[in-house]
């Protein structure tokens, strides 16, 4: 198996000027190609900081981070932006869709920014929206969709550039139990089809749908293991 994420001795310290807060305290963490990992922990445990580092939204204070074989630990802001576009597909709790454009156009955006030709963009978007069960809703705007449907659009958009890893931050946090379960089922299907997923969640029931659960507490990994069948 190929390691998509390799973190060694990762520390993250936030310096407010008056006080220094050590959010991560020497994390060692790896994800292999094809893994489905749920990261759990209470508020303030460091899981959101870990997500920001995995997604190249921030850089570590100390330690080494390789994403898809690239050492991104000391990358510049522009270089990190390029890595995000190429290697990471993001799914957020708040969906982060543009409300004034259709589901089709929302999914098309990364392909547009990536310079994909129009015909290939159209084919890819149609394929992805069909894959997530929204083949009949492509022309609907987010305001015309349910919360679960909006999250499906966000997942299709995350898949658009065929990233190394899908990184989801509390993806069911704004959904009811039924819609949340449907989204986790979709993640399971994507995993079975070969996608690599890292899901940050506080919901242990949903976390157990993953193949592996990593628990963070006080900036350290306190448990890491496969979920029993």
Image (cartoon, rainbow, N blue to C red):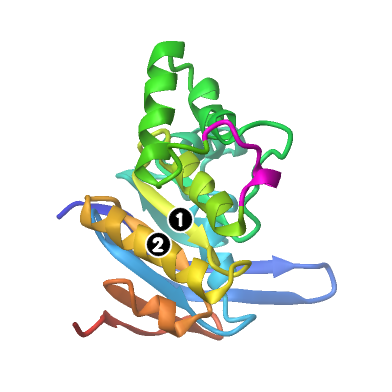
Mark 1 Cα-neighbour bin, 10 Å: few <14, some 14–19, many ≥20: many
Question: Which residue is more in the foreground, 11 or 55?
Answer: 55
- Residue at coordinates 79% horizontally, 76% vertically from top-left? 19
Q: What is the spatial separation of the Cα atoms under label 1 and label 2, in whole angstroms?
A: 5 Å
Mark 2 Cα-neighbour bin, 10 Å: few <14, some 14–19, many ≥20: many
The span picked out in magenta is 138-145
x and y, in percent, of residue 166 in the image: 41, 51
x and y, in percent, of residue 130 in the image: 38, 38
- Residue at coordinates 47% horizontally, 37% vertically from top-left? 136
101 w.r.t. 218: above or below: above
- Where does label 2 land, which residue? 198
How many numbered discs, if any?
Answer: 2
- Where does label 1 land, which residue? 167
117 w.r.t. 140: above or below: above
Question: Could you say which quadrant of the image residue 105 lies in?
Answer: top right
Task: Say what secondary structure mark 1 lies in.
Answer: strand
**Magenta segment includes 65:** no
């Amino acid at each position: 198996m190929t390691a998509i994420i390799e973190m060694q001795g990762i520390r993250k310290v936030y310096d407010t000027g008056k006080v220094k807060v050590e959010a991560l305290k020497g994390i060692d963490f790896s994800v292999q190609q094809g893994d489905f990992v749920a990261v759990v922990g209470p508020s303030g445990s460091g899981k959101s900081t870990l997500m920001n580092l995995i997604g190249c939204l921030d850089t570590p204070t100390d330690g080494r981070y390789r994403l898809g074989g690239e050492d991104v630990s000391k990358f510049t802001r522009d270089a990190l932006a390029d890595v995000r576009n190429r290697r990471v597909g993001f799914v957020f709790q708040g969906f982060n869709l543009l409300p004034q454009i259709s589901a089709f156009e929302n999914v098309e955006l990364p392909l547009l920014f990536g310079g994909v030709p129009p015909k290939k963009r159209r084919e890819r978007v149609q394929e992805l929206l069909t894959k997530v069960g929204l083949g009949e809703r492509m022309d609907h705007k987010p305001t015309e969709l349910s919360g679960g449907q909006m999250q499906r659009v966000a997942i299709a958009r995350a898949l658009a550039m065929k990233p190394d890893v899908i990184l989801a931050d509390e993806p069911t946090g704004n959904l009811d139990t039924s819609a949340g379960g449907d989204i986790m089922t979709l993640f399971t299907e994507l995993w079975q089809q070969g996608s690599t997923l890292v899901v940050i969640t506080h919901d242990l029931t949903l976390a157990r749908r993953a193949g592996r659960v990593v628990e963070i507490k006080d900036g350290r990994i306190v448990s890491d293991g496969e979920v029993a069948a």
